[in-house]
Image (cartoon, coloured by chain):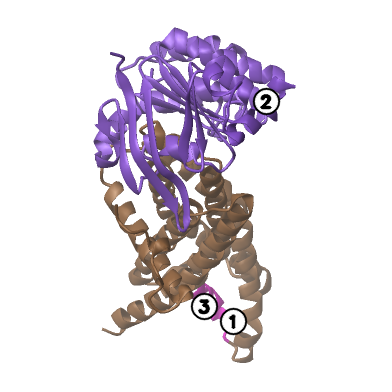
Chain colours: A brown, B purple
């Protein structure tokens, strides 16, 4: 039998060894996802069920947040623009801010809190109550049923939610612009679409796909590896949110650099 | 000669510095109910988890239906698992699914080409057999501990296993429900012609359900035999105290 990681003597220190073991485990988890996602049987019904849970059930919260973000960002930007007599630029400014950064980021952070924690807690609780073992002994692949379906659902649904957030945030912004600058809906949206390019939309969708994948895989990884009973479930849910949010910011930064490099070409 | 369905030789399992199983030898014969007794933490559950490939032994051999579990690939292991029913200590019902969906879950994934009618008939028949036909649309959270155990057993029986593994079937239940579960274990053997290993520290459960007892002490089986052979006149103080502190003797 092979020697287990936890039985080995640490190479440098226990903490460093634990960190690198964790990284290796996470990498193996991601690799396993990409291996299992293409191998039948496919759990289509469960993917649709998870898409409904993640997409439809998150809609009210996302809508409210996006709407408020649109209004607040418009109201906060107005004084600075009005100093230069440039309030007519508000729709352009808001559209660039919302489509390029605010929409994907706000949606991903809200989803990390709502969906990521829920996935982490659900799978964590299934782990500690032996439900995952029960699936395994009934010759069903729990990774495929629990992890692959949820990660696919977040990856597909976060871009949809981002588009919805963008729309709702722009509507919120329009209400504020219409009330203060008396701009019509058509004029507002003409300015909005003039300001954004195809690259903005594509990068926003790709970013949303990446954020969705991150939220799903981190939630599943933390839940799947939870231990120590109910305390462990709480920890898994918490760690899923913290880790997903951290990774989302890192990814935002990386994608921004790549898109800016493409823009300059 | 009786056919062995499980054959364990020199099984060793440790967790870090803790040696749980220290060279276990055990046989389960076709059609018998074998009760494995031992204190909490003695490695009883570890033993049956190795049998279904949830854990791997460090050393020794464990053959189930003639196959060495540790050497099986995923496909072969899953084929073997279809012949083994595992009833978990806490029932392990999928709490986001109804009772019907719980029973359907292994069925639809492992037995193809069943019509809706055939599936429903099988599920209803099993619920009838465990005495809970009315619970078909209930959620696990709406069931009592005893009902959960029965549904857990029904879920394992849906694939018609040859071997049943019961992990602490009466843990946390009142004496009357314990008796119901004990009778269910006996009934399952008779109706489904299974061979079973019952993990417990409840001597009433052991006496009612078991043909043979095996007492796991300090990582090894110290006494194996019928209830009468192992318990009433035990000379080993550890087995004697196990018997004396049980209500059977009171």
- The residue positioned 35% from the left and 63% from the top of the image is A27
- The residue positioned 49% from the left and 57% from the top of the image is A222
Mark sitting on residue B144:
2
Q: Is residue B75 above or below residue B136?
A: below
Q: Judge by depth and name the residue closer to the eye, B8 or A18.
A: B8
Q: Answer yes or no: do the residues labelled 2 and 3 have beta carbons within 8 Å? A: no
Q: Chain of mark 2?
A: B
Residue B2, position as x, y percentages in the image: 31, 14
Residue A200, position as x, y percentages in the image: 38, 71
Residue B245, position as x, y percentages in the image: 70, 30
Answer with left or right where residue B189 lies relative to residue B173. Answer: left
Kindly indicate whether the residues beneath marks 3 and 1 are on one polypeptide chain.
yes
Find the distance from the CA under tag 1 to the CA under tag 2.
65 Å
**Quarter of the rendering containing residue B137:** top right
A259 drawn magenta? no
Q: Is residue B111 visible?
A: no
Label 1 secondary element: helix
Q: Answer yes or no: do the residues labelled 1 and 2 have beta carbons within 8 Å? A: no
What residue occupies the far front of the structure in this picture?
B235
Near mark 2 (Cα within 10 A), the count class, few <14, some 14-19 or many ≥20, is few
Answer with left or right where residue A181 lies relative to residue A7. Answer: right
Mark sitting on residue A87:
1
Find the distance from the CA under tag 2 to the CA under tag 3.
59 Å
Q: Judge by depth and name the residue closer to the eye, A254 or A263.
A: A254
């Amino acid at each position: 039998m092979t020697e287990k990681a936890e039985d080995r003597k640490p190479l440098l220190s226990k903490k460093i060894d634990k960190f690198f073991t964790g990284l290796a485990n996470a990498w193996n988890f991601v690799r396993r996802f990409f291996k299992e996602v293409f191998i039948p049987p496919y759990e289509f019904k469960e993917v649709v069920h998870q898409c409904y849970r993640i997409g439809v059930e998150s809609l009210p919260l996302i809508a409210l947040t996006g709407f408020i973000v649109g209004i607040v960002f418009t109201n906060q930007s107005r004084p600075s623009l009005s100093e230069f007599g440039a309030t007519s630029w508000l729709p352009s400014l808001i559209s660039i801010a919302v489509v390029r950064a605010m929409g994907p980021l706000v949606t991903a952070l809200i989803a990390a809190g709502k969906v990521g924690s829920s996935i982490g807690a659900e799978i964590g609780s299934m782990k500690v109550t032996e439900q995952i073992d029960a699936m395994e002994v009934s010759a069903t692949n729990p990774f495929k049923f629990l992890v692959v379906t949820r990660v696919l659902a977040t990856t597909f649904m976060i871009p949809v939610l981002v588009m919805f957030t963008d729309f709702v945030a722009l509507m919120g912004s329009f209400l504020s612009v219409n009330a203060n600058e008396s701009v019509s809906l058509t004029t507002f949206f003409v300015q909005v679409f003039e300001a954004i390019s195809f690259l903005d939309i594509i990068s926003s969708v790709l970013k949303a796909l990446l954020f969705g994948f991150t939220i799903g895989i981190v939630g599943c990884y933390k839940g799947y590896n939870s231990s120590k009973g109910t305390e462990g479930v709480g920890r898994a849910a918490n760690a899923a949110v913290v880790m997903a949010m951290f990774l989302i910011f890192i990814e935002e930064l990386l994608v921004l650099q790549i898109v800016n490099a493409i823009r300059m070409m | 000669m009786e056919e062995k369905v499980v054959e364990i030789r020199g099984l060793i399992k440790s967790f870090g510095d803790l040696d749980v199983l220290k060279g276990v030898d055990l046989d389960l014969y076709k059609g018998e109910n074998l009760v494995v007794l031992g204190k909490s933490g003695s490695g009883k559950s570890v033993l049956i988890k190795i049998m279904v490939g949830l854990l791997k032994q460090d050393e020794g051999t464990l053959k189930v239906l003639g196959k060495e579990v540790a050497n099986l690939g995923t496909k072969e292991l899953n084929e073997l698992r279809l012949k083994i029913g595992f009833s978990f200590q806490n029932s392990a019902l999928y709490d986001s699914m109804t009772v019907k969906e719980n029973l359907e879950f292994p069925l639809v994934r492992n037995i193809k080409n069943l019509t809706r009618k055939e599936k429903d008939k099988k599920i209803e028949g099993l619920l009838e057999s465990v005495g809970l036909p009315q619970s078909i649309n209930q959620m696990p959270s709406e069931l009592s501990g005893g009902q959960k155990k029965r549904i857990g057993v029904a879920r394992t029986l849906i694939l018609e296993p040859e071997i049943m593994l019961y992990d602490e079937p009466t843990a946390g239940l009142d004496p009357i429900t314990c008796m119901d579960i004990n009778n269910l274990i006996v009934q399952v053997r008779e109706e489904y012609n299974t061979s079973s290993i019952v993990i417990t520290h409840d001597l009433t459960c052991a006496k009612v359900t078991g043909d043979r007892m095996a007492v796991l002490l300090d990582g090894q089986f110290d006494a194996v035999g019928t209830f009468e052979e192992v318990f009433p006149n035990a000379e080993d103080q550890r087995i004697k105290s196990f018997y004396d502190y049980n209500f059977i003797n009171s």
